[in-house]
């Protein structure tokens, strides 16, 4: 139980979540295929009973100057604001993983200022920063799809992984996933 003085930072790697959904669905996700983002904010608030600061990182394209947002992205950004997310719109050179760089810098800043972290990503590139936070006694966890979370990220967070579909119930659809089920959780009904 939290002492009420900490903040839970919910960081969403928008590119990585879209990658994972594309892998599961075998096509680029449509708006109805994506998580109900407000569910993640509610989960984060309930988990450690802290105030939540939610940041959603979006790559808006490569280039030195920002491009105007297309209509769907502009609508999505506005919707995120209504769901208690701060959209972080990024652009930069095509050879730089700009979302990863921004998230790594954010994790470093959280390390200096304090707080717990829930990271919605599957990317092992964040393992070092997450492990560093955990070594300071910060609570850290991953929101994603159990079968796609990198081993390095699992180890860095002591296997604190919350499944977007199973643990958070963030989807209005049932995703076509094939994964091992622990025998204690096995229900034959969906298969019949």
Image: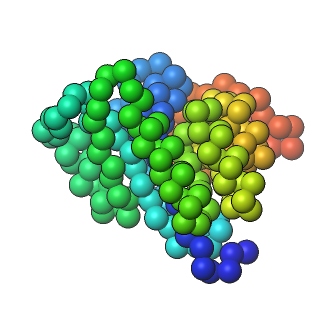
Marker count (numbered): 0
Q: Front-most of 10 and 76?
A: 10
Q: Residue furthest front?
A: 112
Task: Quadrant for the C terminus, please.
Answer: top right
Q: Determine the image quadrant of residue 5.
A: bottom right
Measuring 21% from the left and 48% from the top, which residue is drawn there? 75
Q: Front-most of 111 and 6?
A: 111
Residue 9 in view in this figure: yes
Q: Determine the image quadrant of residue 126.
A: top right
146 sits to left or right of 120: right
Task: Quadrant for the N terminus, please.
Answer: bottom right
Measuring 68% from the left and 49% from the top, which residue is drawn there? 132
The type of colouring in the image is rainbow
153 sits to left or right of 86: right
Q: Position of residue 167 (x, y in %)?
A: 65, 50
Measuring 60% from the left and 73% from the top, which residue is drawn there? 6
Q: Is residue 150 above or below residue 104?
A: above
Q: Position of residue 125 (x, y in %)?
A: 58, 33
Measuring 72% from the left and 39% from the top, which residue is drawn there? 154
154 sits to left or right of 185: left
Q: Is residue 135 above or below residue 152?
A: below
Q: Position of residue 47 (x, y in %)?
A: 64, 65
Q: Residue furthest bottom?
A: 4
Q: Is residue 123 above or below residue 83?
A: above
Q: Position of residue 31 (x, y in %)?
A: 34, 38
Residue 18 in view in this figure: no
Q: Determine the image quadrant of residue 135.
A: bottom right
């Amino acid at each position: 139980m939290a002492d009420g003085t900490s903040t839970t930072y919910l960081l969403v790697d928008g590119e990585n979540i879209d990658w994972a959904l594309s892998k599961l669905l075998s096509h680029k996700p449509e708006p109805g295929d994506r998580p109900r983002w407000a569910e993640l904010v509610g989960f984060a608030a309930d988990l450690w009973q802290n105030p939540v600061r939610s940041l959603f990182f979006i790559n808006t394209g490569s280039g030195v100057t920002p491009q105007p947002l297309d209509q769907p992205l502009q609508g999505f950004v506005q919707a995120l604001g209504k769901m208690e997310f701060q959209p972080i719109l990024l652009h930069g050179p095509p050879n730089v993983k700009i979302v990863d760089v921004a998230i790594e810098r954010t994790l470093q800043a959280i390390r200096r200022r304090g707080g717990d972290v829930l990271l919605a990503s599957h990317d092992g590139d964040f393992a070092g920063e997450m492990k560093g936070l955990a070594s300071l006694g910060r609570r850290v966890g991953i929101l994603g799809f159990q079968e796609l979370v990198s081993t390095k990220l699992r180890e860095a967070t002591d296997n604190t992984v919350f499944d977007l579909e199973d643990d958070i119930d963030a989807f209005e659809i049932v995703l076509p996933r094939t994964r091992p089920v622990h025998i204690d959780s096995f229900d034959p009904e969906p298969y019949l």
